[in-house]
Image (cartoon, rainbow, N blue to C red):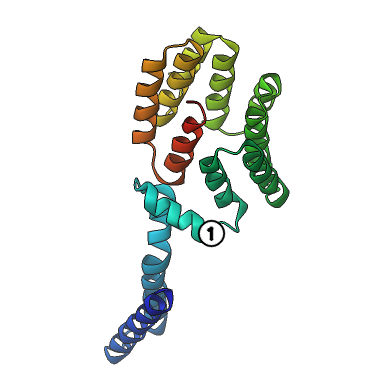
Amino acid sequence: MKIIKYALIFVLGVILATAMMFLELPFWFIYLSVVVIYLLLLVAPQMYTVYKSKDLNKIEQYLEKNKRKPIFAYPLALKTGDQEQIVRSIEEILKRHKQPYMQEVYKTMLALFENNVSKFEQLAKQISKEPLRTYYIAYAEALKGNFDEATTLKNQLPKEWMQHAIAAVIAKQQGNIDLFEKEVDKSIDLATGVQKYSLYYSFQLSY
């Protein structure tokens, strides 16, 4: 199926280039047009799945096809619910991705899955970019039982799925399971792409 898809896109590119050459359009314009068409047909659908799709099955299919990349193996590890596998997948990301921001975020997440709340809070405060810095600090405050502070930070978050995710953590820590489930549903519903998939299975671990 993949070969047929690529072959059709290639043929389309050839036809498009031939038609534009027949019209005696500038070479640079023909080249740019063909590159744009290829990007739209090959890259755009993948980017949509990663960032915007709400279809968990399609997202999982993409993750399975790309699971050799640690960044995509991690959400699949979440689905297994196996704590050791989740930790290993995060460690693999840390090994492969040395960018400071990636290191900051995934070290923070590793501390969370290791249930080390004090380390989790410390690392959250070292995240250099927003909104994840505020998100994880609010998460840490909720785990510590500082619900007023967690709520204040939650209200500063720019993304609604983040606000509802923190509200879910607060509700769980307070023992309000009904509210926890409602907030989880709202958060997952508002999230998209791989983030939606990761949220869905992260919260499955909390039930």
Q: How many marks?
A: 1
Q: Quadrant of the N terminus?
A: bottom left
- Residue 132 quadrant: top right
**One can see residue 127 in this view:** no
Identify the secondary structure beneath mark 1.
loop
Give me the residue at 46% from left, 36% from top. Answer: 199
Asked if 125 appears above or below 43 in the picture, the reply is above
* Nearer-the-camera pick, 56 or 205: 205
The spot of residue 131 in percent (x, y) is: 51, 31
Tell whether 64 sits left or right of 161. Answer: right
* Nearer-the-camera pick, 196 or 80: 80
Give me the residue at 63% from left, 36% from top. Answer: 83
The spot of residue 120 in percent (x, y) is: 66, 25
Tell whether 8 sits left or right of 156. Answer: left
Mark 1 neighbour class, 10 Å CA radius: few under 14, some 14 to 19, many 20 or more: few
- Residue 48 quadrant: bottom left
Q: For mark 1, what is the residue?
A: 66
The spot of residue 44 in percent (x, y) is: 39, 61
Asked if 166 appears above or below 194 in the picture, the reply is above
